[in-house]
Amino acid sequence: MLTAVEVRGLRRSYRGRTVLDGVDLTVAEGETLGILGHNGAGKTTLVETIAGLRRPSSGSVRVLGLDPRADRRRVRGVLGVQLQHAILHHDLTVRENLRLHRSFYRSGEDPDALIDRLGLADVRDVRFQRISGGQAQRLSVAVALVGAPRIVVLDELTTGLDPEGRRGIWRVVEDLQARGVTILLVSHQMEEVERLCERVIVLDGGRIRAHGAPAALRSQTGTETLEDAFLALRSGAASEGSAA
């Protein structure tokens, strides 16, 4: 199986505070990896470093064999990123924002079709500054997908969405999975992770404390839900390590 993302000895510090402390991670092509951790555990720093948005203090990152900073242009052609806070042009409409981002790629998705898939048809001609937080979140997802990437980073994918909107986004992710897209999913929504992720890593103190399939983590901790397994791993009720 080919490798989509490879991280080795990744460290990142801010003003003397260590945020990532020697992270090693391999993600196979076509895999959906869930990234769990409490606020401040290093989740967003990890995916932003993988995406080339932050420079590692030490260690290495490769995305389909490319350095996300040295090979920035080529990585942008294969990697789509949706971050927690959408930073889009406030004076452009939903359609104009998406068409603008589509123009950055040689090929990709049809913006209007993507707008329909993500439930934004009613606001396609509304300026970004006037849409709701949930609509902005869906537009951010659309921007990440418009270049038809081979790898997608989704950071708090369904924050601010109602249950119907959340399930609609899940169906979009499941369509990406069926097409073999590699997905890195940062989430606090355990139901979301259980449904979408084949494997999970638990970050704590900048280190990977456990990894494995959701069912294996439940078995490792003797718990019935992924949320309980996560809490047990954080509290030290389970030994540090991995689950098959």
Image (cartoon, grey):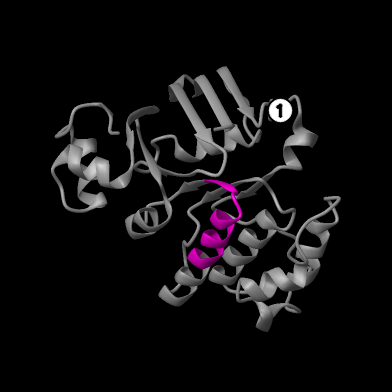
Residue occupying image coordinates x 78% and y 66%: 110
**Can you identify the residue that label 1 sits on?**
69
Front-most of residues 223 and 129 = 223
Residue occupying image coordinates x 63% and y 72%: 117
* Residue 66 drawn at (x, y percent): 70, 27
Residue kind at label 1, given as amino acid type: Arg
* Residue 18 drawn at (x, y percent): 44, 22
Residue 191 in magenta stretch:
no
Q: Residue 38 appears in which quarter of the rendering? A: top left
Residue 171 in magenta stretch:
yes
Magenta residues (range): 170-183
Q: In this view, does 222 lie above or below 123?
A: above
How many numbered marks, from 0 up? 1
Q: In this view, does 25 lie above or below 218?
A: above
* Residue 8 drawn at (x, y percent): 52, 19
Q: Is residue 75 left or right of residue 220?
A: right
Front-most of residues 126 and 15 = 126
> Looking at the rendering, in which quadrant would you find the C terminus?
top left
Residue occupying image coordinates x 75% and y 32%: 72
Q: In this view, does 224 lie above or below 33?
A: below
* Residue 124 drawn at (x, y percent): 72, 77
As drawn, the residue found furthest toward the front would be 1
Q: Is residue 171 visible?
A: yes
Q: Give the overall secondary structure of the magenta segment.
A: helix
Q: Is residue 93 visible?
A: no
Q: In this view, does 53 lie to the left or right of 125?
A: left
> Looking at the rendering, in which quadrant would you find the N terminus?
top right
For label 1, the crowd category at 10 Å Cα-Cα, with few meaning under 14, some 14 to 19 and many 20 or more, is some
